[in-house]
């Protein structure tokens, strides 16, 4: 069974891919869990460890790496959970509009950041996101699966 830190390290490349691409579209806790094969949407502790990893890398390198945690939302509110206080002091005390503005600001900073060196520093490979329709085809056709794997390796 993977540790919380191991799950966090599996999730960071997915979050980086989201930051690089569709940073302004909804990504839910359950999406993040499913993307790494974790069968839960209760990932608050893992999100905290993700932030800890970024903060430790900031301290070690003197960098100012932005948070990735704002990219993930609660399906009901469309915002990060109140556990986001761990990243942004007093987040839970902000109005809904202020929360939306702050999360948008932080996500835009994450979108503009060059994450390649962070992945390299953490010895992580970039995430490959496969669209749902392509994933269905790959799952139903073993030859398509083999072809996809070959294309990823090259």
Image: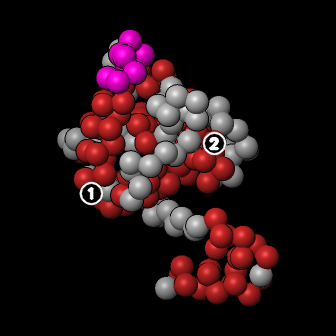
Q: Is residue 144 visible?
A: yes
Q: Main secondary structure of the magenta part?
A: helix
Question: Residue 48 versus residue 134: which sits nearer the camera?
Answer: 134
Q: Which residue is mark 1?
A: 114
Precedes in sequence: disc 2 or disc 1: 2
Q: Is the N terminus in the top left, top right, bottom left or bottom right quadrant? A: top right
Vertical placement of residue 105 versus 135, above or below: above
Quick one: which residue is furthest to the front in this view?
97
Residue at coordinates 50% horizontally, 62% vertically from top-left?
127
Q: Which residue is mark 2?
A: 30
Vertical placement of residue 69 versus 37, above or below: above
Q: Is residue 95 magenta?
A: yes
Nearer the observer: mark 2 or 1; the answer is 2
Magenta segment: 91-98
Q: CA distance from mark 2 to mark 1?
A: 26 Å
For label 1, the SS is loop
Q: Is residue 6 visible?
A: no
Question: Residue 19 versus residue 150: which sits nearer the camera?
Answer: 19
């Amino acid at each position: 069974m993977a540790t919380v830190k191991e799950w966090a390290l599996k999730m960071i490349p997915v979050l980086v891919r989201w930051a690089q691409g569709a940073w302004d579209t909804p990504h839910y806790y359950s999406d993040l869990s499913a993307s790494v094969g974790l069968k839960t949407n209760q990932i608050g502790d893992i999100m905290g460890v993700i932030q800890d990893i970024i903060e430790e890398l900031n301290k070690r390198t003197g960098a100012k790496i932005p948070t990735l945690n704002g990219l993930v939302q609660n399906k009901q509110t469309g915002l990060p959970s109140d556990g986001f206080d761990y990243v942004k002091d007093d987040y839970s005390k902000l109005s809904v509009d202020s929360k939306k503005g702050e999360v948008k600001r932080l996500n835009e900073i994450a979108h503009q950041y060059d994450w390649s060196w962070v992945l390299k520093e953490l010895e992580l490979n970039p995430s490959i996101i496969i669209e749902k329709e392509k994933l269905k085809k790959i799952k139903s056709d073993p030859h398509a699966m083999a072809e996809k794997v070959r294309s990823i390796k090259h």
